Image (spheres, rainbow, N blue to C red):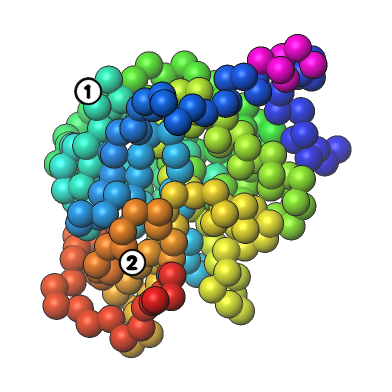
Amino acid sequence: MVSDNTNIQPPISDLDIAQLRQNARLSITSEYEQMPEVIKIGEAVAGTLGNFSAAIGKAKSKKTFNCSAIVASALTNNSVLGYTSCFPIDKRKILYVDTEQGVSHCQKVLNRIYRLAGLSLEQDSEYIEFLALRKYTPEVRIRVIDEAIRETAGLGLVIIDGIRDLVYDINNSTEATNTISLLMQWMDEFQIHIHVILHQNKGDDNARGHIGTELINKAETVLQIERDKDDNNVSRVEALFIRDKDFQPFAFRINDEILPELVEGYTFDKKVGRPQK
């Protein structure tokens, strides 16, 4: 039976609602904690704890290669490709969830992350857990992710490569809203950053389905990964939307070791994202 995943939380009483309202009330005289900035691109803040970011792109645009660089940067708390990470010492664990690829392909992604981070391929790192969930239903995937988030002490970054596979119907608005609400619940409760990957429509540059619309509306940063029209080995990374200041777009290619590397001096012929004032 197809489920719309509506039962994210148990019913809430009127008394609980009154308390939630009280807890949500802001004061002009209060001081509120600024969320730690954990992922940057140049000087621009692309990711903070308690929020989520997204990467969208057409099929074969090398979104997962780009994501591998983000994860390697987080593993080392250093700069990899165009990304620089600075996770607090008690938020260094990473959960990587892949919903699209088989086990052998997932291991290739993990191998790439280790090599980008300079880690030994002879033993598993305690700082990253990689889950291959392609064979499961959306409900089971969500339950496994939820269990992993709740049981991983020191978790700081969660990657969901294929958030489309957490819903049955990509154009079901209820499923989309509930799934994004679940992400926000995880982020707020555990103070983590979540980075998700979603395909763009074939006919335009929009993120696919209602889930894509909800992602763009709620994410603090949306990256667009696009293949160069003249060189299929080169991909461009630009800000479709970003709450912080825009960063300088960059491009990467896949080198002989099947790792992403920056393309120096790349010229961008068009600008995506927010229109210029």
- Nearer-the-camera pick, 248 or 23: 23
Callout 2: few (<14), some (14-19), or many (20+) C-alpha neighbours within 10 Å? many
Kind of residue indicated by mark 2 = Val
Spot the residue most to the right: 1
Q: Which residues are magenta?
A: 14-19
Q: Is residue 210 visible?
A: yes
The mark found on residue 89 in the picture is 1
Q: Is residue 55 left or right of residue 257?
A: right
Q: Residue at x 25, y 49 (%)?
A: 40
The mark found on residue 237 in the picture is 2
Tell me where residue 138 appears, x and y as whole percent: 67, 39
What whole-number distance in Å separates the C-alpha atoms at marks 2 and 1?
29 Å
Mark 2: secondary structure: strand
Which quadrant of the figure contains the C terminus?
A: bottom left
Spot the residue most to the front: 29
Q: Is residue 170 left or right of residue 45?
A: right
Q: Is residue 230 left or right of residue 202?
A: left
Kind of residue indicated by mark 1 = Ile
Tell me where residue 34 appears, x and y as whole percent: 34, 32
Tell me where residue 61 appears, x and y as whole percent: 42, 68
Quarter holding residue 96: top left
- Residue 120 counted in the magenta span: no
Q: Residue at x 29, y 49 (%)?
A: 45
Q: Residue at x 69, y 44 (%)?
A: 177
Tell me where residue 193 appears, x and y as whole percent: 40, 36
Quarter holding residue 175: top right
Mark 1: secondary structure: loop
Q: Is residue 61 visible?
A: no
